[in-house]
Image: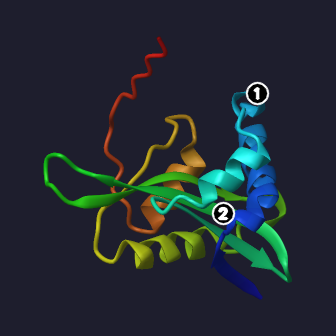
């Protein structure tokens, strides 16, 4: 049976491991530089939320977001950071259940996120749950 719960600072190592799995899945493992100890600090911040999906007590996925404010509307929205389901658990509706939990937490607020143009499977999943995909170019500037 699948259960979903909010991660606490005590889950930092688990969250870090899952995040590294996601980065590895995307071929970006070297991009993860946060430590498990820093993750412990981040999990204590009120604007950051991680939900962990567990099957028989084993972490099989997570979703994370930050609460942000839209300067155009003046209202808060949820900025989804990651959605990840472990390889062996995909196709079992874990991702859908995690996204439904985000929707419940959003309580009517907008949820926004990015998906790589090449990640067609994720785009198909997001459309299936009713998300609108809006084309946009993402810019990064590290100075």
| Image coords of residue 117 (percent x, y) | 49, 35
- For residue 103, side relative to residue 42 (left or right): left
Classify mark 1: residues with Cα within 10 Å, few (<14), some (14-19) or many (20+).
Answer: few
Quarter of the figure with residue 92: bottom right
Quarter of the figure with residue 29: top right
- Colour mapping used in the image: rainbow
Q: Is residue 9 positioned above or below 100 on the image?
A: above
Secondary structure of the residue carrying numbered label 1: helix
Q: Earlier in the sequence, mark 1 or mark 2?
A: 1
| Image coords of residue 23 (percent x, y) | 72, 40
Judging by the rendered image, the residue that carries numbered circle 1 is 30
Residue at (66, 56) in percent of width and height: 84
- Whether residue 90 is visible to the viewer of this picture, yes or no, is no
- For residue 73, side relative to residue 6 (left or right): left
| Image coords of residue 13 (percent x, y) | 81, 56
| Image coords of residue 53 (percent x, y) | 70, 73
Judging by the rendered image, the residue that carries numbered circle 2 is 62
Real-space Cα distance between discs 1 and 2?
A: 20 Å
Residue at (84, 63) in percent of width and height: 88
Secondary structure of the residue carrying numbered label 2: strand
């Amino acid at each position: 049976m699948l259960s979903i719960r909010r991660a606490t600072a005590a889950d930092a190592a688990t969250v870090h491991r899952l995040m590294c799995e996601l980065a590895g899945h995307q071929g970006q493992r070297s991009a993860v530089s946060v430590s498990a100890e820093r993750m412990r600090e981040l999990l204590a911040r009120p604007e950051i939320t991680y939900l962990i999906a567990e099957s028989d007590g084993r972490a099989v996925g997570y979703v994370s977001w930050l609460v942000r404010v839209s300067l155009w509307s003046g209202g808060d929205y949820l900025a989804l950071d990651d959605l990840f389901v472990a390889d062996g658990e995909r196709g079992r509706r874990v991702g859908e259940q995690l996204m439904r939990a985000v929707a419940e937490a959003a309580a009517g607020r907008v949820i926004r996120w990015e998906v790589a143009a090449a990640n067609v499977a994720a785009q198909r999943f997001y459309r299936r749950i009713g998300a609108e995909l809006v084309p946009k170019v993402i810019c990064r500037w590290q100075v």
